[in-house]
Amino acid sequence: MPLFGTNGIRGVLNETISPELGYRFGMAVGTYYVDKKIAVAYDNRTTSDLFRDVVVAGLLNSGKDVVDLGMIPTPAAQIYCKLNNIPGVMITASHNPPNFNGFKVISKDGSNPGKGEEVKIEGLIENGNFNKSRWDTVGASHKEEAVEPYLREILKNVNRDQIRKKRFRLLIDCANSTTVVTTPRLLRLLEANYVSINANTDSYFPGREPEPTEENIKDLISFAKSTEFDLSVAHDGDGDRAVFLDEKGKMIDGDKFVALAADHLLDKYKGDLVFPVASSFLIDWVAQKHGVKLIRTPVGAPVISEVLTRTNGLLGGEENGKVIFPRYLNGGDGGLSLALALDIISSRGAEISDLIKELPDYKLRRIKIANRDDFKEIKAKFKEYYSKMSYDEIDGLRLLEKDSFILIRPSGTEPAIRIYISSMDSEWIDRREREIKGLITS
């Protein structure tokens, strides 16, 4: 199995990843990049100090100087790398459960490296052909501030004065993680009032799991429904995406928010869209509305970023709510998503629930089958059972029927199989889910 999954290397300490792997990863990254400096940042998981230290040791032994950015969200580290034109490393497992951790590589332009680069770094990890220092050429480390430059870059992409005039009242959930150091400061700069939950860092994530699913953020939903807020937001563990609740406390599907953001940005700029096969046909509708091209890719921010670069695309995104806007950063950022949400509401002068209602009602149901490694067998069953549907294999198997689809693919971040069912017809989705559950258990 390759080390790099959908977005970086992830696993559990001394089960699927080890300190030795972290050290080799640092040596490999230090060997691969010719740059003298490499930035390092990390989230607040229990194993982050351990993995940061061994990765830094590998980088220093490869002769690199390390810029220690501290505990910050992944996109803040990416913006630092972009502004300073240096590569970086993020120690994080993003939205995975607390027992996971991992390593992400950041390219000099702040983006996720392409699969080709990951293959080369992985090859170095495996063959051990590292650059090694002498005692007098070993690298050094120093600390630098990354939060203020990050917030300044976000604010360049929205109408700050227009947002300030609204005096928004917000509810925020920082997931006991990295956005604790950025989102409150961003909202103060936008002169928004806010109430926060899970706003202290805690390595055990006592408030909720790091992934902001509807089940995991039920406390936020309950709070939002009991009090009047213009918008509520929940971040994931490393801050590269956000999910939203409308003014009534109803969760906005990530697929619909990304489409709303695309519609908003296409009013200002023109360019093609890059979205994975897991996104619904709603994004096709947005592309057709604005007369731009839609390019479909496999799932994963690194793939989307690579295609955006190759095609000079305007915007990419994922059905989980991640927005990728290369003019700002060729990677997802929950901080930018929050600022864009406020920009959309303030510019259109309407509640966000009304703006969502204006979009075609494509629904997207997600099913995760944990601890399954029989994807090939399940895929063959699906092909046979749904033989009358057309299909593609851009990523896993996507079965198509007019503007509805079923997608089945192995997870790139954990041992699981992910299934997506999308349609404007709820009954169609319900029937497919019943059929699929029968196929999975048979």
Image: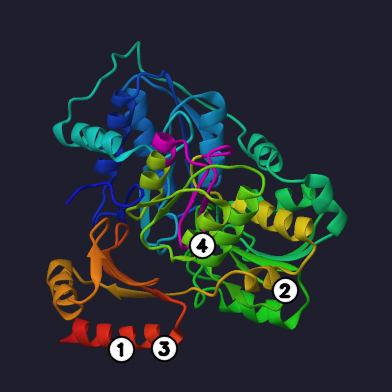
Disc 1 crowd, CA 10 A, few/some/many (<14, 14-19, 20+): few
The reply to whether discs 4 and 3 touch (Cβ–Cβ < 8 Å) is no
* Along the line of sight, the residue nearer the viewer: 360 or 85: 360
Seen at 73% across and 83% down, the residue is 226
Does residue 3 lie above or below 174 as drawn? above
Question: Tag 4 or tag 2, which sits nearer the N-term?
Answer: 2
Where does the magenta region start and end?
A: 308-329
Q: Which mark is residue 285?
A: 4
Q: Position of residue 200 (x, y in %)?
A: 62, 59
Q: Which mark is residue 3?
A: none
Seen at 79% across and 46% down, the residue is 160
Question: Tag 3 or tag 1, which sits nearer the N-term?
Answer: 3
Question: Tag 4 or tag 1, which sits nearer the N-term?
Answer: 4
Question: Tag 2 or tag 3, which sits nearer the N-term?
Answer: 2
Q: CA distance from mark 1 to mark 2?
A: 33 Å
The residue that label 2 is drawn on is 247
Disc 2 crowd, CA 10 A, few/some/many (<14, 14-19, 20+): many
Q: Position of residue 58 (x, y in %)?
A: 32, 30
| Three-letter residue code for mark 2 | Glu
Does residue 227 lie above or below 141 as drawn? below
Q: Nearer the viewer, mark 4 or mark 3?
A: 4
Q: Which mark is residue 427?
A: 3
